[in-house]
Image: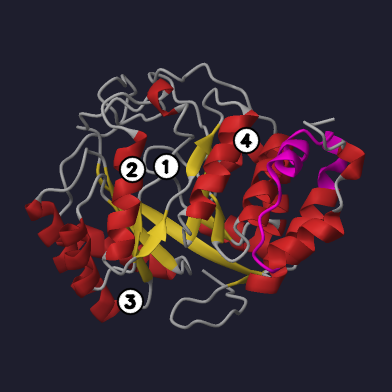
Amino acid sequence: MADGVRLTDLKWSSIIERSLRGAAITREEGRAMLALPDERVPEALQAAFEVRRAHFGKRVKVCVLQNARSGLCPEDCHYCSQSSVSTAKIDKYRLLPVEQLLDGARRAHEAKAKRYCMVTGGRGPSDADIERFCETARAIRARYPVELCVSLGIMSEEQARRLKEAGVGWVNHNLNTSERHHPNICTTHTYQDRVNTVRNVRRAGLMTCSGGIIGMGETDEDILDLAYAVRELQIDSIPVNFLHSIPGTPFESYRHLTPMKCLKVLCLFRFLNPSSEIRAAGGREVNLRSVQALALYAANSIFVEGYLTTPGQQADEARRMIEDMGFEIEVNGDGNAGVAHGG
């Protein structure tokens, strides 16, 4: 039993119906879902797929990340190889020139990615950083039909407006975890700083991209808090990351996740955020391992070609996985779904 809802009492038809009309599942149902025996995960995936299919069909959006500035970050996020408290052996470099960022967009386009996201380590962007990304956005928009996202840290509304005017469509700034657990993973900025950035992005007229990282010592209650928080903020695009513990970071020994737990979390986020993009994001490969294709029943988006300082599934392999599962890749250049063949 999970706080009044027995695992055998989860009524999938009711959960699907309520999710499809935008009503939240109860917290008790969420607890029961996260506590499901592993052998019942296929039930949750099938139910989540009904909600996913209603909003996204069988389309899968492929996204590519570009590490635009590596390391050199003053923040102490314990999960991050680029933070001030990390001794991880990574490349460190200042903000890339426009030409290299533009080349990243070319590679994303050639990988059949629908979205290209440029990411910087650091507390937040300077005015010079914003101008660099505005110049880059204008150059990319003139050449490649990809969606543009940036992840630049804590940001003002005015900075977000400048990015929108230049052609950026999305800004990523993850809540990362629950408000209660946040001080255990970072002390140099607050959970509210992150919420404020998400709100600044929305006020500027940009699409919001914000999710979290599962596996950082949080409880199921923290996972529920995060899932309800992104629902309350009406986030457009939700990356669900699973901790890839990196040697040299404070969380290097954390190994809390199983593939089945990851799938339950994705189902929870889908039921609570039925019309939002749900992305099986960082750590997908190392945590879901041989069952990562099953994530597509709940998630409608994935990253390919790596995660800033760690490798990931290559685009060709991801395309085969998507097609083998009977799903379709969203083709860059238009809003329609289609199967993208070839490299």
Q: Is residue 324 visible?
A: no
What's under tag 3, amino acid-wise?
A: Tyr
What is the x, y in percent for residue 43?
A: 85, 50
Look at the image and give the residue range highlighted in magenta: 21-42
Inter-mark Cα distance, 2 to 1? 6 Å
Mark 1 — residue?
175
Q: Nearer the viewer, mark 4 or mark 1?
A: 1
Name the residue located 56 percent from the left edge and 32 percent from the top edge.
222
Q: Is residue 29 a member of the stretch shown in magenta?
A: yes
Real-space CA distance between mark 3 and mark 4, rounded to the nearest whole angstrom = 33 Å
* Count of numbered tags: 4
Instruction: Depth check: give the residue in front, 231 or 99.
Output: 231
Q: Secondary structure at mark 1?
A: loop
Marks 2 and 3, how far apart in space?
30 Å
Q: Visible in this render: residue 33?
A: yes
Nearer to me, 147 or 181: 181
Residue that label 4 marks? 287
Q: Report how far apart the C-alphas of labels 4 and 1 lie in the structure.
A: 21 Å
Helix, strand or loop under label 4: helix
Residue hosting label 2: 194
- Secondary element at tag 2: helix
